[in-house]
Image: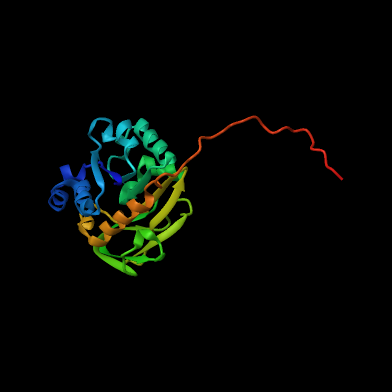
Amino acid sequence: MLRVTIWNENRHEQNDETVARIYPRGMHGAISEGLEPEGFSITLATLDQPEHGLTEELLQNTDVLIWWGHTAHDEVRDEIVERVHKRVLEGMGFIALHSAHYSKVFKKLMGTTCSLLWRVADEKERLWVVNPAHPIVQGIDRFFELEQEEMYGEVFDIPEPDELVLLSWFQGGEVFRSGCTFRRGHGKIFYFRPGHETYPTYHNANVIRIIANSVRWAAPVPDLIIPAPSYGPWPSQEPVPVQV
């Protein structure tokens, strides 16, 4: 059984009545509810818990960490960022949702500013599947639409993705790389764009299907043997005799 931790800063749900009505159990609760039929073992964690809910023990027992953050990126303690970063390099999967592109963890993994064009559009988003053979989009049609979403547009300052899976188009004409995969160390990372807090995006069946698929894709490979690094002496620099 895959062990999934869903982390959410959980601030909008406490301070905005609109968000609280859409997500009475928090966005993390809605995602968890959507993923329940998948048979994952799910743990919820939030910013205001001790150690932000991300203890060493929990992370060691997490196969995939899902992250949503927005207004409180700077409140995430650096030692927790280092802890998560280390686990990703060791093989834990990491799924960054929506505004998590600006989280300390995602920026550290990418090594770039992760900045982008932004507009509260309150308009339709069409997500095109541009890599239909990828396991993350299995069960998804060639595109699907969200009637209301926030606009993210290019240029998106990230490294070239290992794989581009989804591309968004907005009514204003902007486009955005909305489903991107990366590998860092032994860990797999998926960035998935939709999820503005004032829209019911995490109640959408296609969005939940993609998150579920990405959990399975990002999970560590069972029984994979990763040898410990070996730092032996340098090979001899003496010339090797050549036989004629």
What residue is shown at x 22% (from left), y 49% (from top)? 32
Between residue 214 and residue 191, name the one nearer to us: 214
Applied colour scheme: rainbow
Image height of 170 relative to 65, above or below: below
**Most distant residue in the bottom direction:** 142
Residue 157 in sight: no
Image height of 93 relative to 165, above or below: above
Residue 30 in sight: yes
**Most distant residue in the right direction:** 244
Give the percent coordinates (x, y) of residue 66. Answer: 31, 46
Q: Quadrant of residue 204?
A: bottom left
Between residue 103 and residue 15, name the one nearer to us: 103
Give the percent coordinates (x, y) of residue 115. Answer: 40, 49
What residue is shown at x 28% (from left), y 31% (from top)? 51
Image height of 44 relative to 166, above or below: above
In the rendered view of the protein, which quadrant contains the C terminus? Answer: top right
Number of callouts: 0
What residue is shown at x 24% (from left), y 39% (from top)? 45
Give the percent coordinates (x, y) of residue 67. Answer: 30, 45
Between residue 46 and residue 91, name the one nearer to us: 91
What residue is shown at x 26% (from left), y 48% (from top)? 40
Give the percent coordinates (x, y) of residue 228. Answer: 51, 35
Q: Quadrant of residue 170?
A: bottom left
Horizontal relation, residue 150 to residue 233: left or right: left
